[in-house]
Image: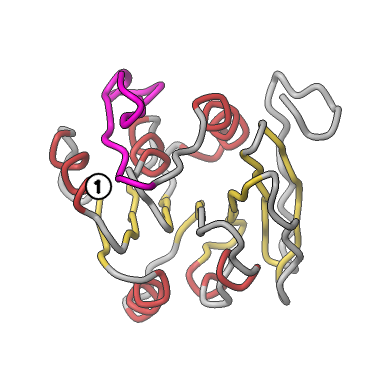
Amino acid sequence: MSAKEVRIFAGRWKGRLLEVPSGARPTSGRAREALFSIVSESLRGAHVLDLYAGSGAVGLEAVSRGARRAVLVEQKPAALDRNVARLPAESGEIEVLRGSVGEALEALRRRRDHFDLVFSDPPYGSTAEAAVPQTLGEILAPGGLVIVQTDGRSRALTEPDGWTILSRRDYGRNVFFFFARAESSLKLPMPESFDGREGKC
């Protein structure tokens, strides 16, 4: 595996290599494994939205592990398109939306799509509004979860209006914030390897 590739770790596409777009900063393998450990109980049959998808590693791994479908949003999708083309996905399992996150969210809102899990990995230094756009509240299914990845050296995210941070987990430079709607009673399960110290596995 080259530095320009990442691997799907589990599920029916386990071992498949994905091309990383030039200039992208893929989530580390350790962090991605930990992420899927945390959401494993809610993944099967889920509808997943992957914003700023890059290689598509998160959304594609979600489908590999049992999600019903994934919509991947990417402004420069050449590498993502090649990755999707190499996978033997069934019709409707994977959809790529080309363009900005704002445009994609508006299109999804208009067609009344809803998602159980949303992963957002915006460019470094993005605002909380860019990471968790208010439009997400209209397409997040009841009890849904939004996971935002940031860099450990970036300023910590704050809670946008209408949202609450359930947890923060740190894996080296990869930091995950778990958001739910403020009125949600969602509780975040701990992965089996959670050690209770600073949210680290």
Residue 172 in percent (x, y) is at: 67, 31
Judge from the rendering whether residue 18 lies leftward or rightward of residue 41; answer left or right: left
Identify the image quadrant of the N terminus: top left
**Residue holding disc 1:** 80
**Identity of the residue furthest to the front in this view:** 23
The segment highlighted magenta reads: 1-23
Q: Main secondary structure of the magenta part?
A: loop
Indicate the position of residue 150 as horizontal and vertical percent values.
61, 50
Give residue 103's quadrant in the image: bottom left
Q: Is residue 2 magenta?
A: yes
Residue at 42% x, 40% y is 58
Residue at the spot x=57%, y=31% of the render?
31
Q: Residue at x 33, y 54 (%)?
A: 72
Q: Quadrant of residue 110?
A: bottom left
Query: Is the residue marked by circle 1 packed among few (<14), some (14-19), or many (20+) residues within 10 Å?
Result: many
Q: Residue 133 in the image: x percent, y percent?
A: 56, 73
Q: Count numbered badges in the picture.
A: 1
Name the image quarter holding residue 170.
top right
Quarter of the image where the C terminus is located: top right
The kind of residue tagged 1 is Leu
The percent position of residue 54, horizontal first and vertical second, equals: 36, 49
Disc 1 element: helix
The colour scheme of the drawn protein is secondary structure
Q: Nearer the viewer, residue 47 or 77?
A: 77
58 is higher (above) or lower (below) than 181? above
Q: Is residue 49 left or right of residue 151?
A: left
Q: Is-magenta flag for residue 54?
A: no
Relative to 175, does residue 172 appear above or below in the rendering? above
**Residue at the location (71% across, 72% down)?**
160
Identify which residue, 145 or 171, lies in the foreground: 171
Q: Nearer the viewer, residue 12 or 143?
A: 12
